[in-house]
Image (spheres, rainbow, N blue to C red):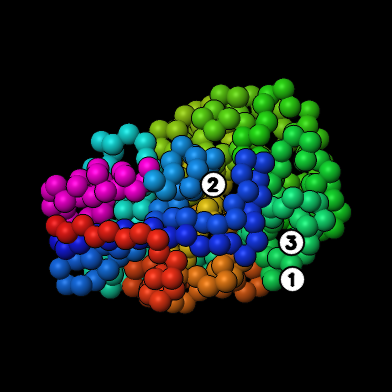
Amino acid sequence: MKIKSITLHILSMPLKKPFVTHLQTVEKREGIIVEVQDADGLIGLGEGVAFSTPWYTEETVKTSYHMLKDVLIPLVYSNSFQHPEEIGNRFAAVRGNSMAKAALEMALWDLYARQQNVPLWEMIGGTRREILAGAVVGANSLNEMIKQAEDLVREGYQRIKLKISPGADVEIVKELRDHFPSLTLLADANSAYSLEDKSQLQALDEYGLEMIEQPLGVDDLVEHSLLQKELQTPICLDESIVTPHDMKSAIYLNSCGVVNIKLGRVGGYTSALEIYRLCQENHIKVWCGGMIEFGVSRAHNLALATLEGFSIPGDISSSSKYWEEDIISSPIVVKNGRVERLDGAGIGVELNRKRLGHVTIGKEMFNQ
């Protein structure tokens, strides 16, 4: 793969509605779009999904930009390579910074698929024609959460994720279950609980949740293993699984029954595909999580979710859920709870250059 240039765009775009968790309220989304161009003019696209502040992981937009500019892009240019997996392995020499790594590695996978003129989903072994779509409900009041859920159900979403925290959990889950007796519900705690809160979490067992996502510490596997023994509801790990080694440890400890695979959190396709393989071999369910992304990352999520094991609806909502106008030319659309896979070369979307220009607050190009 002969790379001619790599361009970084820093974006800032307001959400249609604030996204609320116990950790942070997000009203505008900053992020990084990566363009990798080869000698023939083909362009691969990636997206850096770190937030402006380190509330989800330790990475931020600024730290990701630094890592891309000063460390990762020079690594790409340091030696020739034939396949993007080689870059995933090359980045292993750099500790942490998974979201920065993923942004660039995703763009290289997209470019490689475009060079072969095949969809990226086909290149990674995907088979699903339709991807099951879920969405996240996050608001400051129970009434607003119910209204958001009602709107999403009308749009055809088959699974709703609720944000919970101590003191804002059982009542919320009970009310949503009463309103939607047969809807698939899961609760996402974003590490809000400790083992001392076991009884609160056990109280959720009676509401038929598909899973409780990341109830304990972001770097914990041992206490999740202890908690899982006390719950009927499967634990889903999110922030705790960053590397394939984390996944192996979780398997040995029986820390979870489900894993949320996010390309940005795990450092890109090379790591994500290995985590997926480990889950398949050990009968752990997987689904594709979201990060309030722009359309580039959303298209990458669609490609990943075509793999046969992604049987649980993922956080792959329509572009219109978050944005008045997305930065891709053909917005992602959920119909009747499903999204059609994108059959164009690579991730199957192109940038809407006019919209990109309106929301770009910084841009820099790096030549070979």
Nearest to viewer (mark 3 / mark 2):
3
Circle 1 residue: 154
Report the amino acid beneath label 3. Answer: Gln
**Residues packed near mark 1 inside 10 Å, few (<14), some (14 to 19) or many (20 plus):** few
Nearest to viewer (mark 3 / mark 1):
3
Tell me: 55 left or right of 169.
left
The residue depicted at 34 percent of the width and 63 percent of the height is 45
Q: CA distance from mark 3 to mark 1?
A: 10 Å
In the foreground, 145 or 309: 145
Tell me: 350 left or right of 282.
left
Q: CA distance from mark 2 to mark 1?
A: 25 Å
x and y percentages locating residue 260 in the rendered image: 54, 46
Query: Which of the two discs, 3 and 2, labels the residue nearer the N terminus?
Result: 3
Report the amino acid beneath label 1. Answer: Arg
Nearest to viewer (mark 2 / mark 1):
1
Res 170 quadrant in image = top right
Res 130 quadrant in image = bottom right
In the foreground, 315 or 50: 50
Label 3 SS: helix
Q: Where does the magenta region start and end?
A: 63-87
Circle 2 residue: 260
In the foreground, 41 or 111: 41
The residue depicted at 77 percent of the width and 40 percent of the height is 168
